[in-house]
Image (spheres, grey):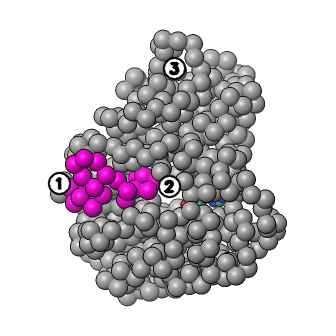
Amino acid sequence: MIRYHLATYGCQMNEYDSAMIARKLEARGCISVDTPEEADFIIVNTCSVREKAEETAIARISKFKPIKKKNPDLKVVVCGCMAKNRGKELFKKLKMVNFIVGPDHYEKIPDLLLGTYPTKERIFLEEDLEQNYVGDFAKIQNHFSTFITIQRGCNKRCSYCIVPYLRGPEKYRETQDVLDEVKMVADKGITEIMLLGQTVNAYKTKDCDFPQLLTKISEIGGIRRIRFTSPHPRHYTNELIDVLLNNSKVCHYAHIPLQSGSDAMLKKMRRQHNLEQYMSIIEQLRSKDPYYGISTDIICGFVGETEEDFEWTLKATEQAQFDSAFMFIYSPRQGTESAKEVETLTEQEKLERHGRLVELQNSITLKRNQMMLGRTEEILVERASSKDISEMVGKTDNFKKVVFKPQGIVRPGDYITCKLNDIRGWTIRGEMEK
Ligand code: 5AD
Ligand code: SF4
């Protein structure tokens, strides 16, 4: 048996791609193992979005050196965004790497590893605008919920972001291909789907746009919850908002990146939306459902960000009442537009702003969680609690984690009902109704 080990960094799109590679390897008879020491093949799927993400992946790959020394037949593939970004340089730096494979060449990985690829090439980085991975479904991540990528690449060119340079322009998966994958997973018992794309709500094919796709998926038997990430504020049309609020299978939760609360910064970031437009989306969603879950991404300390700009971000965060936020310190990425500018803040100043934002958001997260107390909610059960295995953890429709004591036999993947009655730290606790 040939054993492979897959390590994935970065976003959910990378997790989906890794699952797609896993399915291809398993179709060729390979089996997955948990540690690199047991593996014949190691595949590292990498991220470049911030410098730290690259450093983490390089440190991890360096650790394979002694493993390769013990097992010279071990083959290592580096794929994903960092492969594309630092390709040839990685070969020089990390001698144990056999193949560097960019995002448009994953179908080659099994042949490369199994030695059946027709040439001796080792680097595959060229952009392939035709590559749409038709019929290449992913290995199901667990038996009740799975990711499905519907869009690759990005056309937005935000001035800080390296992704469009690495992943190329937007490509949408054919609607029938997406629906076939959803049907395939629904037949296997999956009830929750997470649709993925860099700007997922920009989805458009000749047959279908994003709101229509949501509707079509909701009509597939067995699907109970539809989620998606990440939408771009620019593409919240009235049609989309209508489906989001009126289709009962589409969950009341979205991760909508704001990036900054200052219009001057949003302009400089080339975000294609201002604060007012962003807030109007939140208002429309929350005026119909005050519990509508909203999370966001915010960058602190962008080039040129003044104290006043940052205060706008604090004000916007307060006004938006995000359920949670990923808060990043600006990291200039070589090749992007904003990296050409000289930074105006020290690391210490950026860190200080980040700390102030985190503190504010923590208090808002707590408030939003407290708001849930007293409600009776449907929970999709995910797993046993890691702190106490007599308890279980699941999620509400609006993506709140809930811990509860099971009554009778409860399995991951079950839908149960809980009365939310307590909060410890940030964690909501519920009493299961029989
Ligand atoms: N520096 C810091 N954060 C970044 N992001 C993207 N590029 C950068 C960068 N250069 C953040 C954005 C994006 C998330 C995936 O990563 O907030 O939404
Ligand atoms: Fe990282 Fe972005 Fe690439 Fe995902 S798309 S792997 S987050 S750089």
Neighbours of disc 2 within 10 Å: few (<14), some (14-19), many (20+): some
1 and 3 marks in contact (CB < 8 Å): no
Bounds of the magenta span? 196-217
**Is 312 situated above or below 81?**
below
Please state if 161 lies on the left or on the right of 173 as rendered. Answer: right
Q: Which mark is residue 221?
A: 1
2 and 1 marks in contact (CB < 8 Å): no
Secondary structure at numbered mark 3? helix
Tell which of 385 and 246 is nearer to you: 246
Residue 392 in view (yes/no):
no
Q: Nearer the viewer, mark 1 or mark 3?
A: 3
**Mark before the other along the chain sequence, 3 or 2:** 3
CA gap between label 1 and label 3 equals: 38 Å
Neighbours of disc 3 within 10 Å: few (<14), some (14-19), many (20+): many
Query: Is residue 207 inside the magenta stretch?
Result: yes
3 and 2 marks in contact (CB < 8 Å): no
Q: Nearer the viewer, mark 2 or mark 1?
A: 2
Residue with the mark numbered 2: 156
**Is 275 situated above or below 98?**
below
Q: Position of residue 36 (x, y in %)?
A: 61, 33
Residue with the mark numbered 3: 112
Query: Is residue 423 inside the magenta stretch?
Result: no
Secondary structure at numbered mark 1? loop
User: Which quarter of the figure has residue 394?
Assistant: bottom left
**Is 37 situated above or below 330?**
above
Q: Position of residue 187 (x, y in %)?
A: 21, 46
Secondary structure at numbered mark 2? loop
